[in-house]
């Protein structure tokens, strides 16, 4: 029996919410019209000049439809799963018979590779089934299974078709026969998490407690003594790749039991996927100790280890977290996938215990790092999302070689593009949360939806000026009076210092703000119109002094958007620019630029010199440190690197 105190799952909310937002609607259509067809070609190795995927190839070989060897990474199957999942979400808001036919064919191919006992992973089907489940630490079998469960759930929910869902139920049965705490099974768990939250999603559809229990088992067993990964390593006489570095088994979040973990550690994508699964499991079971662990990890992650852009993962070494307040701008990892996972985690925390900060973090990651992960034409992608770039350094400094100054066509390890796709196509599911008696507005993305207060249905239609202005209009429709049903709560964004809330044109005077949400005391009726006007001035931001990399620097935000300086607008040597704390910043709409963006301008200073190029150091003098007045021009961070290669910086010297 579920303890979950919510009335709608993510898939249900996604299914009944239609986005009509001019900002995100554009990106969702870009994913549907450009990214998904492009990715489908990439999965079949038909994009010229892009790294081969081998994904479809592997399934054909595994299904006996062609001969050949396994190609690509051990987790290659997951790219197809993520593509199916992303495409499935689009069918919920844009039925498309042709796409559905492509999906059916892709699913036929996947299922034709499934073994009689339910097993389904092309790496081991091709390379020898006798070796299955012998390297849970690094071989991503359970990770790929998790992604296919997510795909199956989305496709089933979008179309009612059970083929992939039934195949995955058989695969989960196969996994459950091999892995678990019972005598004779392997007491293992995944090296790369995701199956935990996927199994909870499966449980929400099937109601089969063994799906929920397997997720709970993976979470509870993780990091227990004796450590499964260590036992597995000894059995196979393998080395431990991370043994000589600082991460060790915390690379996998497996160095200690999850309830004893207090800091976000290790590979950042794995971490947020695990935390998402933990929050899901805590919501299902009502397990207070697991909820406490989620809260501790959330606080550490968002208060001490998150970039202003919502990027996470400070180091390329292990694609991992490092230590509190260590947030280097130019060597950051900040993987697109990690920010997608951060949105998953925030959304699940919102279900656990509603608070505005969860919407704040979702908004931050979505409008900044996740959008920055794709080009404006939807065909190029960032894996790493830096806050400062000097292109030459990316090419010549090994320590920065993971940072690319321009988005890439496709990656051999192509986790990020399909992850961005599935995030954006499922975006309708993140706008609202139904919890207990109440309904919460998390994100101000224009849409029409059906929500419930205490189980009773009403309609909601939102128009939003985000992210360019803070004007939001919400119209309520209900067949009967909403009196006594429950409350609708509106997130007051953490960045917003003043706002005006009105009902039917009159200021709302009876309302409470609790944990970042505005709860109206007025009863709502059919036809009521709520308007919210969030003041959105440009704001200069500074970082906690413990963040050494940002010491003495300012960044600029306007509403949910973080801004950056680009060489295209400000010339080279961005490090020589500075911004006065008192400088006035003005906003200018530029329709022709980068698809239409609000740019920001302010007076600033640039250090110039008449120095010879061969003259490296001089005594300081007014002449040697001479600065001229300049106008600084900022663009939204998400839009950087769409005008050719050049320097970029989010943080700029203060003074
Ligand atoms: Zn990725």
Image (spheres, rainbow, N blue to C red):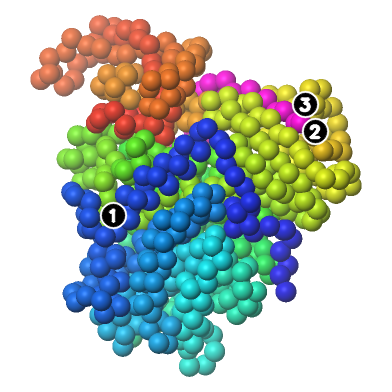
Asked if ligand 1 lies within 8 A of label 3, the reply is: no
Callout 3: SS: strand
Identify which residue, 77 or 137, lies in the foreground: 77
The answer to whether 498 appears left or right of 504 in the picture is left
Quick one: label 1 or label 2, which is nearer the N terminus? 1
Residue 240 lies, in percent from the top left, at 31, 72
Q: Tell me where residue 535 sits by quadrant.
A: top right
Q: Tell me where residue 111 sits by quadrant.
A: bottom left
The residue singled out by tag 2 in the image is 528
The residue singled out by tag 1 in the image is 41
Identify which residue, 609 or 202, lies in the foreground: 202
Quick one: label 3 or label 2, which is nearer the N terminus? 3
Asked if ligand 1 lies within 8 A of label 1, the reply is: no
The label nearer to you, 3 versus 1, is 1
Q: CA distance from mark 1 to mark 2?
A: 48 Å
Residue 322 lies, in percent from the top left, at 41, 51
Res 610 seen here: yes
Q: Quadrant of the C terminus?
A: top left
Q: Is residue 157 above or below residue 385?
A: below
Q: Which residues are magenta?
A: 528-547
> Which label is found at residue 502?
3
Callout 2: SS: loop
């Amino acid at each position: 029996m579920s303890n979950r105190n919510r009335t709608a799952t993510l898939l249900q909310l996604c299914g009944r919410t239609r986005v009509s937002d001019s900002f995100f609607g554009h990106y969702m259509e870009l994913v549907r019209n450009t990214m998904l067809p492009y990715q489908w070609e990439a999965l079949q190795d038909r994009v010229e000049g892009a790294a081969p995927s081998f994904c479809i190839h592997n399934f054909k070989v595994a299904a006996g439809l062609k001969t050949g060897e396994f190609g690509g990474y051990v987790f290659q199957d997951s790219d197809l799963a993520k593509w199916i999942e992303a495409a499935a979400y689009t069918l919920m808001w844009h039925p498309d018979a042709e796409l559905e036919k492509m999906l059916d064919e892709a699913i036929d191919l996947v299922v034709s590779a499934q073994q009689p006992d339910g097993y389904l992973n092309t790496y081991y089907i091709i390379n020898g089934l006798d070796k299955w489940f012998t390297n849970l630490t690094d071989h991503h079998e359970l990770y790929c299974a998790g992604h296919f469960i997510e795909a199956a759930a989305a496709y089933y929910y979008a179309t009612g078709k059970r083929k992939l869902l039934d195949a995955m139920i058989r695969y989960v049965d196969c996994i459950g026969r091999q892995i678990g705490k019972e005598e004779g099974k392997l007491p293992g768990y995944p090296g790369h998490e995701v199956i935990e939250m996927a199994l909870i999603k499966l449980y929400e559809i099937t109601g089969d407690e063994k799906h929920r229990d397997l997720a709970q088992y993976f979470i509870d067993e993780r990091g227990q003594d004796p450590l499964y990964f260590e036992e597995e390593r000894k059995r196979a006489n393998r080395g431990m790749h991370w043994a000589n570095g600082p991460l060790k088994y915390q690379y996998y979040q497996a160095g200690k039991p999850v309830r004893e973990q207090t800091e976000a550690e290790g590979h950042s994508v794995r971490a947020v996927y695990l935390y998402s699964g933990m929050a899901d499991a805590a919501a299902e079971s009502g397990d207070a100790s697991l909820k406490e662990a989620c809260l501790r990890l959330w606080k550490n992650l968002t208060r001490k280890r998150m970039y202003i852009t919502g990027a996470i993962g400070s180091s390329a070494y292990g694609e991992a977290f490092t230590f509190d307040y260590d947030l280097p701008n130019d060597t950051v990892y900040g993987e697109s996938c990690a920010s997608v996972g951060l949105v998953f985690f925030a959304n699940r925390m919102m279900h656990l215990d509603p608070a505005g900060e969860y919407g704040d973090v979702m908004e931050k990651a979505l409008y900044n790092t996740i959008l920055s992960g794709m080009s404006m034409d939807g065909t190029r992608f960032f894996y790493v999302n830096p806050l400062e770039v000097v292109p030459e350094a990316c090419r010549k400094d090994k320590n920065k070689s993971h940072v690319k100054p321009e988005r890439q066509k496709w990656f051999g390890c192509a986790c990020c593009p399909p992850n961005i796709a599935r995030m954006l196509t499922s975006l309708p599911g993140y706008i609202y949360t139904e919890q207990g008696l109440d309904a919460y507005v998390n994100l101000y993305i224009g849409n029409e939806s059906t929500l419930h207060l205490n189980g009773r249905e009403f309609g909601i239609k939102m128009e939003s000026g985000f992210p360019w202005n803070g004007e939001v209009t919400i119209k309520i429709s209900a067949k009967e009076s909403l009196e006594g049903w429950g409350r609708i709560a509106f997130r007051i964004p953490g960045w917003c210092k003043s706002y005006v809330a009105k009902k039917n044109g009159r200021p709302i005077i009876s309302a409470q703000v609790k944990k970042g949400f505005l709860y109206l005391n007025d009863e709502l009726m059919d036809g009521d119109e709520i308007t919210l006007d969030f003041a959105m001035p440009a704001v200069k931001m500074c970082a906690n002094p413990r963040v050494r990399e940002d010491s003495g620097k300012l960044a600029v935000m306007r509403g949910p958007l973080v801004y950056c300086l680009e060489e295209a607008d400000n010339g080279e040597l961005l490090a020589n620019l500075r911004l006065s704390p008192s400088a006035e910043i003005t906003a200018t709409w530029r329709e022709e630029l980068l698809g239409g963006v609000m740019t920001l301008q302010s007076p600033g200073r640039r250090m110039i010199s008449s120095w010879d190029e061969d003259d490296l150091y001089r005594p300081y003098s007014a002449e040697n440190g001479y600065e001229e007045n300049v106008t600084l021009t900022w663009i939204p961070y998400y839009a950087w690197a769409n005008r050719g290669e050049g320097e970029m910086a989010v943080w700029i010297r203060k003074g």
